[in-house]
Amino acid sequence: MSPARLSLASRPQWLERVEHSPSDRRDSEPGVLHLGLGAFTRAHQAMVFDRLLASGDGRWGMHGVGMRQRGLVEALHAQDGLYAVRVADAAAVRWVVPAALWRLSVLSTDREAVIQAMASPALRWITLTVTEKGYTPELGALIAQGLMRRHTAGAAGLTLASCDNLRSNGQHLRQLVLQACESAKLQRWVDVCCAFPSSMVDRIVPASSAALRDQVVQELGVVDESPLGTEGFWEWVIEDRLADPSDAAALSAVGVRVTPDVHVYEDAKLRMLNGSHSAMALIGAITGRAFIAHCIGHPPLREFVRRLIEREVAPHLQRRDWAEYQDALLARFGNPHLRHSVHQIATDSSLKLPQRWPPSVEGQLRQGASIEHHALAVAAWLRYGLAEDEQGRPYDISDPQAQWLRDVAALQKTRPAHSLDHLLTRKDLWGPLLVEHTHWKARVAYWHQAVLAHGMDEAVNRLIREVP
Ligand code: CS2
C-alpha cells in the first residue's frame, strides 16, 4: 500500500515521529495574512506563529498567499496546510510539522479573496516575503485596496511587516502603500492606525528537493509534496513599532527580539551573511561548486569569507556581538545537512548586491582601509555573467537584468576595460561614491584580470597571499 499523504487525517501515523506535536485547533479566523508564501516563510515566521498557537494564543493562524505558485498552494491544500520541516545541524536532527497555515490562496486567481481577507476583523498582521523585486507599485496598490476596504468596514489598524532582505524594509513598504492610497483620508488612517516595523529575519532555508521528499516517506511514513530542510538557528528582530503594542510581549516570549535598534541587526545580517553568501554563490557558480557547504569546505574560500567579514564588513557594524554571529555563521555555512544551491542565492544578484556590498566598501574607503575582498567579489560577478563555469558547463542566470549582465560580460575577454567600465559606472548598483572612485575601480580591474588569467580559485589564493 502506498503511504498516506501528510494531513490532519493521517496524524496518528506521523505524530509520534515529529518532535513538536502541532495543534489542530482552527476555531478562529486567521490573524495573519502572509504575502509571498515560499520556502523561507514556511520555515521561519510560520514556525514562530506555530509556537504562539501552541502556547494557546489562537490569534496567529496564517492565511498564506502564493503570488504565483499555484502548485505549492495546491499541494499544501491537499495537506491541510501541513508540511514537514527537517531541522538539522551539528547539534541535532529533528522533524517538526508546523500547523500555522490555516488558509491558502494564489494571488493571480484569488485576488478578491485576498483583498477581502485584509478587511477581516480578526486580521491583525500582514507579513511579506515577496523578494527584493516584489516591491512594485502593484504590490502597493493591492495592499492599499485591502486597507481601503478595511477602513470602510470600520476594522482596527494592522501591523504590516516586511520580512525581505532590504534595509529599512518597513519604511520602504510604508512609502509604497501610502503612495498607492487613493484618498488623503485613507492615507491619514494608514498613517495613524497602521504600523510598518522594519525587521530582520534570518534562517537558511534551501528550496525543497526530491531527496527530502524521499526522506519524509522513509522517516515519517507519509507523503509530503513540499517538505523543507533548515538549520536550528533562527533570528527575527523586529522594530518596536506595532499596531498593538502588547504583541511585543507575545513575540518576545517565543524568542523574537523586539527592539528600537533594528538597523543594527539588519546591517550586520545583510552585509555579513547575505554579503558573503552572494560572494560564495558567484564564486561557486564559476568554479562549479554546487552548494554553499562545498564553497566553505574549500579552505582558501573559507579564509576569504572570514577575512571579508572580519576586515571589510565588521569595522562598520554596530551589532556588538558580531564576532559570535560570525563564528556561528561560518558553522552555519558549513552545515552538511543543508544543500543550499549557489545558483539559488545568485538569483537576482542585480537587486541583492546593492544592499550587501557597497555599504562596507564605502565604509572602508572613507577610512582608507582595504577593499580587496569586495573588489574580487565584484570581479566574480562579471565573470559569472559569462553563464558558464570554468569547466565550460553552461548555467542559467535568473535575474531581471540577466540580458544586460550577459551583454556586458561578453565584452570582458576582448575588451575587459570596456566591460568593467559598463559594470562599475552604474550608480543605481554601486552608489555615487564608488562610481567615481578610481582606486576602487583599479582594484576591481586588478582582480578581474587575475580571475581571467589564472582562474577563480587561483585569484582567491593570490588575494590571501598578497593581502597580508
Ligand atoms: C540568501 C538568503 O538567497 C539569498 O540571497 O542570501 O536567502 C539567506 O539564505 C537568508 O537571508 C538567510 O537568513
Image: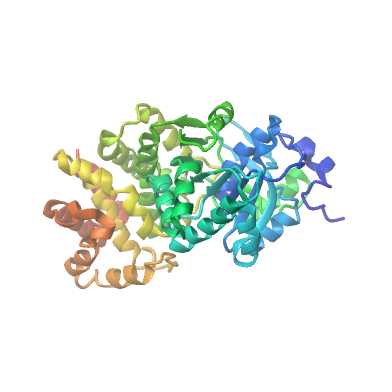
* In this view, 416 is above or below 432: below
> 211 or 156, which lies in front?
156
Asked whether, in this view, residue 443 is left or right of residue 187, the answer is left
Residue visible at 68% across and 35% down? 53
Q: Could you tell me residue 354's position as x and y percent?
A: 32, 53
Placement of the N terminus among the 4 image quadrants: bottom right
Residue found at the very far right of the displayed protein: 1
Left/right of residue 432 with respect to residue 410 in the rendered view:
left
Q: Quadrant of the C terminus?
A: top left
Looking at the picture, how far across and down is residue 185, in whole percent? Answer: 47, 53
Look at the image and name its color scheme: rainbow
Decide which of 427, 127 is in the foreground and name it. 127
Occupied quadrant, residue 287: bottom left
| Residue at image point 52% right, 38% down | 243
The residue closer to the viewer here, 209 or 34, is: 34
Q: Is residue 61 above or below residue 457?
A: above
Residue 166 appearing in the image: yes
Q: Quadrant of residue 232?
A: top right
